Image (tube, helix red, strand yellow):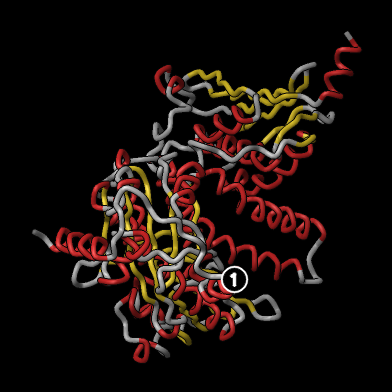
């Protein structure tokens, strides 16, 4: 008999000693009042907030699998429960709900009580439970205890599903999620301290921070940066950044060429062959006259999250698109905060030219939209419902083209917009803008030597028609056939999600997207979106 079987057997003996019947579960009433529940939840609020973020992401990645996630405190009182509505309702009927204390004397052999009792993760599958009504359920449970600095909180995170959906990877997945939640809470606490210490850190997480003066001499170098680079903090301050070649390659361009690096992923290797995956941001620091006074490098260790994502991908390969995109979204959002902060600082300057202010304002608005759009991007397999409104497509195209114009100029590409008459549609502005940016980005990448992109907009009685045409290398018949298939791409660095996301967005709008392509001539994407009722009425009246 192994340890788990022995633990379960002893628990069932205790249940028999309690006089519990195994064919029914006693009626369990909430063991804490509403007021006391509110007090307990307030104490656990930081943990609940992070747990919901990770838990809901995990549920989405399981792509419809009936799962309920529960949080209990160290007394076994359930503080939070969310997930599949049908399964939640069934659990409530047998007494597993918020405000109830789970214990052996009433609930029989259960994972929450055993995890708290033995301080170890455990899973109960079907007949492992004492009560027969739970024989069709699986419960995975992992205990946690935070340090004194983080509030000394303790309890369990449990995940329940049906026996038919049991997986041997689930307990490992839940353990990794629990550890990641604890680390995330620790990161949040450190971020608050870093924010108070340095006003340049607008929104920092568990980041390595390196500050240099204009000559490249290191003036600040925190512990995380030392851990990533393997350099002693005390010994490196006052030394030139060239003494750390891994960092110098990013800092020197900011000092000498005033370049900014935003959200660059880089893998560091230590002497023991251990790899650390990081996101890098490097920007020049300017004085009041606008001259470069130094450089700021932020190094964020995302190794743990990368490993967590890999673990989740092994979970029977469920929702592959969601898992990949979730990692991408997390990596995009963090540098967004820094970019938006610097944009805001620029907007507060009184010496900006009006046209520059307009460009920055548009850029700032786009970044705010991007925070929401990224969430839809990662949910390609199940995009959020579009917020349908009366939309001026002409104005949207003008703003999007202005946003992409700088990138186009860098690639020697000219964007032509044909038709200035207002054309309207019923659509979600943010999602349609995402589609347009994606198509423009693809068009630019199809013309590495430069060229022209033509955007035309027209309206009929039933729909608005948008066409984006490039002069690039075009596609073969097989490439065109699979162009909207996830993970199919002809790019060396692409992942093949962009056009499949566009397809799902347009499909959710009740529209269509198609393409016409000729090898070595170019490609044209045609989008049709529903027109507003007023536009249809006017068009029909003309007929």
Would you place residue 503 above or below residue 276 in this image? above
Residue 62, position as x, y percentages in the image:
40, 44
Query: Is residue 50 among the parts visible in the rendering?
Result: no
Question: Along the line of sight, which residue is nearer the eye, 237 or 183?
Answer: 183
Q: Mark 1 points at which residue?
A: 38
Decide: few, some or many residues near mark 1? Use Cα within 10 Å; few <14, some 14-19, many ≥20. some
Q: Is residue 107 left or right of residue 96?
A: left
Q: Name the element at disc 1.
A: helix
Quarter holding residue 114? bottom left
Q: In this view, does 47 lie to the left or right of 249?
A: right
Residue at the front extreme? 19
Q: Is residue 340 left or right of residue 230?
A: right
Residue at the left extreme? 1
* Residue at the spot 46% in from the left edge and 26% down from the top edge: 483
* Residue at the spot 64% in from the left edge and 55% down from the top edge: 367
Quarter of the picture holding the C terminus: top right
């Amino acid at each position: 008999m192994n340890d788990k079987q022995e633990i379960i057997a002893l628990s069932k003996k205790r249940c028999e000693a309690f006089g519990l019947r195994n064919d029914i579960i006693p009626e369990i009433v909430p063991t804490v009042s509403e007021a006391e529940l509110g007090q307990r939840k307030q104490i656990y609020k930081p943990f609940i907030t992070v747990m919901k973020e990770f838990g809901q992401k995990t549920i989405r990645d399981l792509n419809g699998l009936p799962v309920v996630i529960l949080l209990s405190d160290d007394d076994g009182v359930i503080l939070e429960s969310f997930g599949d509505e049908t399964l939640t309702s069934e659990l409530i009927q047998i007494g597993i709900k918020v405000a109830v204390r789970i214990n052996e004397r009433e609930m029989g052999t259960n994972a929450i009580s055993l995890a708290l009792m033995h301080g170890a993760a455990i899973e109960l599958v079907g007949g492992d439970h004492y009560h027969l009504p739970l024989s069709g359920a699986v419960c995975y449970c992992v205990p946690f205890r935070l340090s004194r600095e983080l509030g000394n909180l303790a309890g369990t995170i449990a995940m329940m599903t049906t026996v038919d959906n049991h997986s041997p990877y689930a307990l490992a997945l839940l353990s990794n999620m629990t550890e990641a939640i604890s680390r995330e809470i620790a990161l949040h606490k450190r971020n608050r301290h870093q924010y108070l210490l340095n006003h340049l850190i607008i929104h920092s997480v568990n980041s390595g921070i390196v500050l240099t003066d204009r000559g490249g001499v290191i003036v600040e170098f925190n512990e995380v940066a030392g851990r990533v680079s393997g350099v002693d903090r005390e010994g490196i301050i006052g030394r030139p950044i060239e003494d750390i070649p891994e960092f110098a390659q990013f800092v020197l361009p900011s000092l000498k060429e005033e370049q900014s690096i935003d959200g660059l992923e880089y893998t560091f290797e230590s002497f023991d062959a251990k790899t650390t995956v990081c996101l890098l941001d490097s920007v020049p620091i300017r004085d009041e006259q606008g001259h470069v006074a130094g450089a700021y490098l932020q190094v964020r260790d995302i190794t743990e999250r990368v490993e967590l994502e890999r673990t989740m991908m092994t979970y029977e390969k469920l929702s592959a698109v969601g898992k990949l995109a979730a990692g991408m979204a997390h990596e995009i959002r963090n540098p967004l905060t820094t970019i938006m902060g610097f944009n805001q600082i620029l907007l507060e300057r009184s010496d900006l030219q009006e046209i520059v202010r307009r460009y920055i304002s548009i850029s700032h608005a786009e970044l705010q939209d991007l925070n929401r759009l990224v969430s839809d991007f990662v949910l390609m397999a199940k995009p959020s419902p579009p917020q349908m409104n009366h939309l001026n497509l002409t104005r949207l195209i003008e703003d999007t083209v202005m946003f992409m114009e700088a990138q186009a100029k860098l690639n020697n590409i000219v964007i032509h917009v044909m038709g200035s008459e207002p054309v309207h549609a019923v659509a979600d502005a943010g999602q349609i803008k995402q589609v347009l940016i994606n198509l423009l980005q693809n068009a630019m990448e199809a013309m590495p030597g430069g060229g022209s992109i033509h955007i035309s907009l027209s309206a009929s009685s039933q729909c608005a028609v948008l066409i984006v045409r490039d002069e690039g290398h075009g596609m073969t018949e097989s490439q065109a056939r699979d162009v909207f298939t996830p993970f199919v791409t002809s790019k060396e660095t692409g992942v093949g999600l962009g056009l499949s996301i566009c397809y799902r967005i347009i499909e959710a709008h009740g529209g269509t997207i198609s393409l016409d392509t000729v090898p070595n001539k170019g490609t044209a994407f045609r989008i049709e979106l529903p027109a507003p009722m007023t536009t249809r009425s006017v068009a029909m009246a003309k007929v």
